[in-house]
Amino acid sequence: MKDASLDYATTEATWKSYGKFNGEHRISCLDHVYFAGLDCNVEVLKDTTTDHRPVLAKILVPSGKTGTSAGKIAKVVKAMRATEALGVDGIPVSVLKKGIEVLAGPISHLVNRSLASGTVPTALKLSNVLPIYKGKGKSAADPASYRPVCILPALSKILETVVKTDFEIHLAKTEALPNTQFGFRRGRSTTTALATAHAKWLKAEQRGKVVGVLGFDLSAAFDTVDQLQLLPKLKKLGIEGMQLEWFKSYLSGGSQRVVWNGAESDFLNVSPILYLVLVADVTSCVGIGDEENSSYADDFFLWAVGDSLEEVGLLLETKADAFSKYAGGNGLVLNAAKTQFMIGGKAKKKDTSAFTIRVGGVELHPSDEIEFLGVKFDSDFTTAPHNAYV
């Protein structure tokens, strides 16, 4: 008889209920929604021996022409929320929605000029940042307790939506992204990321295996990546000519300022990152398969399955070393303070307190629980710690 606990549909249904209960947060590639990474005082995991600069394994077909029409612009604007939130231009989306029948033509002209010239006007790269409190259990006095949400000019949102739509179609057609990346993608979410990882852990446990799980956090991932790392990967994906020039322009010269209780800070330089493309080659470069990892945006989990603690420990160290080198070669910073390590499965019946592994020169002891996408698991791979917390 098929074990229901190993069925993906069953676990997905479970996680959907968790998502509804916890207020699941979805994000998209070009929405300028950044995770909290405001505290720069982080201990860094990094490899210092050699320079590792992996690139995508295969060159894909050119993505073709991009452009839009008044009809498409009208459709985009009508689908946008009629928010009154103001970007630096002071024009809310609600105003454009009311006048879109008249404005669609001029807006499509502006969008096509931007795409044809390979440039993004500076005025469209300025944004206000609203710190949004993450909620229960977070210190209101700690900047890391806030999720910075950038509010762009309304025209910038339209331009990005046009590009994002075409780019998503291209990525889907070329199958350039790994199956284990669940962030920023249509039809995928924290629910599917949790369901997939949880089902694989349970399957290994019920086979009588030792399961070792490592969780990495990339500090301020969207702000720390040099576009010089990203642009060659865009080119490998078939983004070239004026399309590549457009992304160069998009990724440079942007500014943002924080709006808090009516006060506004000065503008700060930022480089919005097409994060999916940057890390699209992680599984091939690190040498891990679909059965051994799951990621959502800058949260990356990998695991190893074996017959003994020693075997799993060696596998984890090898995978972690490769991932650390990959991250360093791509300008990403691993936050050692947030690196998680847990041993589960058959090993939970043994004393693992003295067992350690080394990751990036840092010695890690296994914890009794780990947290993945806001949900806490114990070494039995149940959510008892999370249930107690909420």
Image: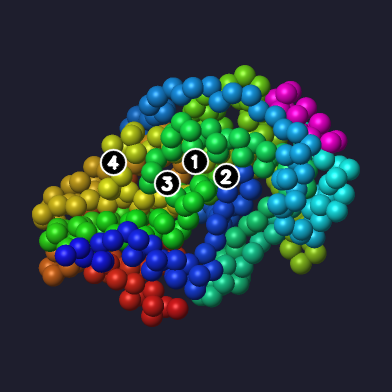
Tell me if I can see residue 157 in this picture. no
**Do residues under tags 1 and 3 come within 8 Å of each other at their CB atoms?**
yes
Crowdedness near tag 3: few (<14), some (14–19) or many (≥20) residues, C-alpha within 10 Å: many
Q: Which residues are magenta?
A: 105-120
Asked if the residue under mark 4 is in contact with the one under mark 2, i.e. CB atoms within 8 Å, the reply is: no
In the picture, the quarter occupied by the N terminus is: bottom left
In the image, is residue 384 above or below residue 282?
below
Residue picked out by circle 4: 288
SS of the residue under disc 1: helix
The disc, 2 or 1, on the residue closer to the chain's N-terminal end is 2
Q: Which residue is mark 3?
A: 181
- Name the one closer to the observer, 316 or 156: 156
Tell whether 189 sits left or right of 165: left
Q: Residue at x 40, y 24 (%)?
A: 58
- SS at mark 4? loop
Callout 2, which amino acid? Cys
Q: CA distance from mark 2 to mark 4?
A: 24 Å
Q: Earlier in the sequence, mark 1 or mark 3?
A: 3
**Residue drawn at (75%, 33%) of the image:** 69
**Mark 4 / mark 1, whichever is N-terminal:** 1
Per the rendering, the mark at residue 29 is 2
